[in-house]
Image (cartoon, helix red, strand yellow):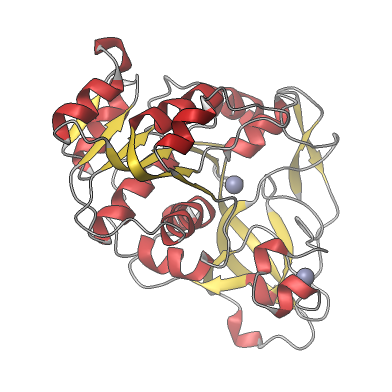
Amino acid sequence: MRVATWHGGTQFTVDEAPDPVPGPGEVLLKIDTCGICGTDVHITQGLFPGDPPSVLGHEWSGTIVDTGLGVDASRVGMDVAPEPSAYCLQCWNCRIGRHSRCERADRWPRNGGFAEYAVLPDRIVHDLPEGLSLADAAMGEPASVCLVGLERCRTPGGSNMTIIGGGLIGLLTLAFAKSRGIGTTILSDPVRFRREQALRMGAEYVHDPADGPLREMVDEVSEGRGADLAVEAVGKPELVDLAIQAARPRGEVLILGVSPRGTVIPSDLFETQYKELVIVNSFGRGDGYLRAVNLLAKTDLTGLMGDRYPLERAGEAMEAASKVTSKSVKTSIAPHMD
Ligand SMILES: [Zn+2]
Ligand SMILES: [Zn+2]
């Protein structure tokens, strides 16, 4: 099979690799779509741990084309949404159901998703719910990040929300929060295309940082109170501070964006304490992967999955995914496209 091997920076080569064979308990996945995650971009920029050469990609969807010993052969031909990593089911975290915190997690058993095929343990490979396309199913991991983040918050329905960042995480958080009954919502993003997408997905107001301070708009919308829930969906320390400033006294701040290791929040600790803020941190898919995939099937995802690239153009795809001005919310690799 062909794989796109990452060699550091945005250097990729397309290489022949042995055709993977599923072992006991495993399935062979023919990869349809593999989304480029912000984490993949951070890895290529040296901001998240990763060792080249390797085959990246973990936001995948595809079809089962072979099964190993002990897996029901009738699974061949099924369209599926696999989780981004394999958990052991034996460690302390796995035993209490916190699979995403597995102490022995295998990020990807043989190779990542920028490849024609992958072998995965069947236990992390879930059937696609009705109404969800293979391309959209590649959003399972980011969708669970958003859903689990919201589930960790206590802000009740009807409250107002401010989201900083209109990338996939900000937009799916918006859609899911709306389906959970959140009230008036502002989404802030410098890119017009993303603000338009936010309005299509249910935001009542959008904010362009070039037009003035976010807090002013939050005050207008909340009668000076501040945001009941302020979400940082970018991964920049100054935007975490902006969310802290936007939140009302006793409000909640949800941090979903992943900042590079070593980042320090440039916030006034007095303000966070004086306002008695609850700061909620959430990372990764938590235990919400299946719920998120099912929720995706009930969500209008028009406009989210953007440009698809073949393996040969993986480097170009990575560059496109790292540009905030990209017209594509989610850039992906489609290993079998011509
Ligand atoms: Zn990801
Ligand atoms: Zn485990």
Is residue 126 among what the camera can see? Answer: yes
When the figure is inspected, residue 279 is found, relative to residue 82, above or below; the finding is: above
Q: Is residue 132 visible?
A: no
Q: Residue at x 72, y 67 (%)?
A: 120
Q: Does residue 111 sit above or below 90 in this rendering? A: above
In the displayed structure, 216 sits above or below 68; it is: above
- Looking at the image, which residue is at 19% across and 55% down? 158
Judge left or right: residue 53 versus residue 169.
right
Pick whichever, 150 or 292, lies toward us: 150
Residue 54: name its quadrant. top right
**Is 328 on the left-hand or right-hand side of 157?**
right
- Who's the residue at 78% across and 74% down the image? 92
Report the front residue among 228 and 53: 228
Where is residue 47? Give x, y as percent. 71, 28
Residue 239's spot in the image, x, y percent? Answer: 46, 26
Q: Position of residue 135 (x, y in %)?
A: 45, 52
Number of disc labels: 0
Locate the C terminus by quadrant.
top right
Front position in the image: 230 or 208: 230
Q: Is residue 44 left or right of residue 179?
A: right
- Residue at x-position 72% and y-position 42%: 56
